[in-house]
Image (spheres, coloured by chain):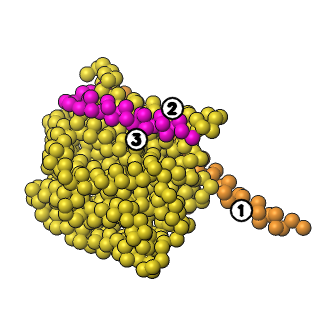
Chain colours: A orange, B yellow
Amino acid sequence: MSGVPLVFYLGVSAAMFLLGLLGVMTRRNPLLLLLAVELMLNGANIALVGFSRHWDTTDGQIFALVVMVVAAAEVVIGLGLVVAVFRQRLQLNVDDLARLRG
Amino acid sequence: MSHLNVVAALPLIIVAAAGVLAMGTGLFDSQRVRRYAPTGVAVAGIVAAFVAIVVLWGDREEAFGGSLRTDRFSLLLSAIFLAAALLVIALGWHESAAVDRRGEFAGLIMVAVAGMMLVASAGDLITLFLGIETLSMSLYVLCALEVWRERSLESGLKYLITGAVGSAVLLYGLALLFGATGALDFATIGQQLELTGLTADPLVIAAMALIVVGLAFKASAAPFHMWTPDVYEGAPTTVTAFMSTATKAAALAAFLRIFQGVLPELAADWQAAIAAIAVASIVIGNIAALVQTNMKRLLAYSSVAHAGYLLIGVAAGGIRGAEAVAYYLIAYLAMTMTAFAVVIIREREVENGEQLEALAGYGRARPVLGIAMTLAMLSLAGFPPLAGFVGKFLLFGSAVEAGMTWLALVGAAGSVVSLGYYLRVLGVLWLGGREDAQPARMLAVPGPVLAATATAALSIILLALLATPLIDISRGAAEALLAP
């Protein structure tokens, strides 16, 4: 096999995964948490594609495509929940604003 | 091998179709259709899937070119998921979340069941991951179904974040396993590991560790259980009941499928790891449950402890271990569902009905529900001759047989500690409150709810009486699981 050796794929993939994990553990904003989780999933995707090239099969790439769909669905649900929470909080804030009205 | 063989996937297809249909009927204009159709479609789907399971019961068949294995193991587990779904849909008869959003409630429960069936019958890594994600995502939404309650939303969001981290860790483990063997289907991975002696390969060891951690998140086993009490408390109680029974069964199915079915070569390594997680779950779950005053949190910690007992069976391995896990999952379904059913009934009558003190004297006022709760608590604690005792006997017995007597002793010690909180519930239930006063505000229990509660409570006794045939069925499932 020519081109970039497998080790480099794995290095990038592990770095992305660990950065994502670090993000999940340190961040407190739900949007950033979702981003960090995406980073973890994509780290795994790079490993899958790298291994797929190493073994000269397309299986890993198919898996990576499935993971992308799953990740997209996860973000949709996550954003939906964040919006729902925000709406609840917003209602409270609107009440506060009403009290300030001259 | 290369043909579709749709018939073998029939239970899965029926459940998924019923889920989509139920969700669709929840959108109709007519209030009458919205009220009855989703439940009707879901129940019809469950019954049809049960029939398909009985018809298909037999030797292994493969569908979709080997991605899906229909064998006794997957069929037995599918029956457990379906039973849990049926009970939960009945219990949700008058719950506010379920009434306003019946289509979503019934539909998502069915989709979650389809995901669980996918996990139990997975024949390759993609199917396994897809199944776990399908069930998790339905549950994220189900947790947040009461959108007007901030606690419910918070529970959904918390579960989403921790669940997604668990999924990502699991996925990385699966990716490394693919990297080490170059195959995605279980049969080839098993052969590769057997032939090449890759068992000491750091890639395989790392894959195994990540898979254990990822699945432990899903099974809410300690030390990856932090989300469990918060999510269980915030979610609608019917959803909590479904999560603690069906989801646990699905996670254990994944444990058994991967570790006993695919990685038997590495048994020495994963047995130690899983035994450590089992001990942590038993210790942390039982001790934390002792100080809870909220029934949902108490049952959450109890479910962490039970994940530990179940993992003893996985760690013990072999046919005896898998058989014990399968039997205990059935028993655990009956007793946990009964306990949650009583909490659900009380919760609809008074505010803060999920608190332990809301049950004070409830047994005296409502002997039928009191007896149901008593059966559930005694069975969870492992009192003979109830189903929980038979299950624990099998689990601990399999550990002793595998030469892990110390693990069985930890489990037994945990059961003794668990008496502390199970008996406390019974004390409050029968002796709490003032002798002459009735508990506040009692409402009539709707028919389906009462029927589900009674069925689950009676099953606790029946499962023990019918232990011999059930253990035979569980053994058939375990043999199918271990067959190459």
Q: Nearer the viewer, mark 2 or mark 3?
A: 2
Tag 2 and tag 3, C-beta contact below 8 Å: no
Alpha-carbon span between mark 2 and mark 3: 14 Å
Magenta segment includes B36: yes
Amino acid of disc 3: Val
Q: Are marks 1 and 2 on the same chain?
A: no
Alpha-carbon span between mark 1 and mark 2: 37 Å
Snapshot quadrant of residue B2: top left
Where disc 1 sits, the SS reads helix
What residue did someone put label 1 on? A92
In the displayed image of the protein, which residue is found farthest to the top?
B3
Which residue is at the front of the view, B454 or B463? B454
How far across and how far down the image is residue B212, in percent? 30, 52
Tell me if residue B222 can be seen: no
How far across and how far down the image is residue B258, in percent? 26, 43
Name the residue at 55% across, 33% down. Answer: B24
Alpha-carbon span between mark 1 and mark 3: 37 Å
Of the 4 image quadrants, the one containing the N terminus of chain B is: top left
| Marked residue chain, label 2 | B
Q: Is residue B415 left or right of residue B289?
A: left
Q: Is residue B204 left or right of residue B222?
A: left
Which residue is at the front of the view, B386 or B437? B437
The boundaries of the magenta stretch are B35-63
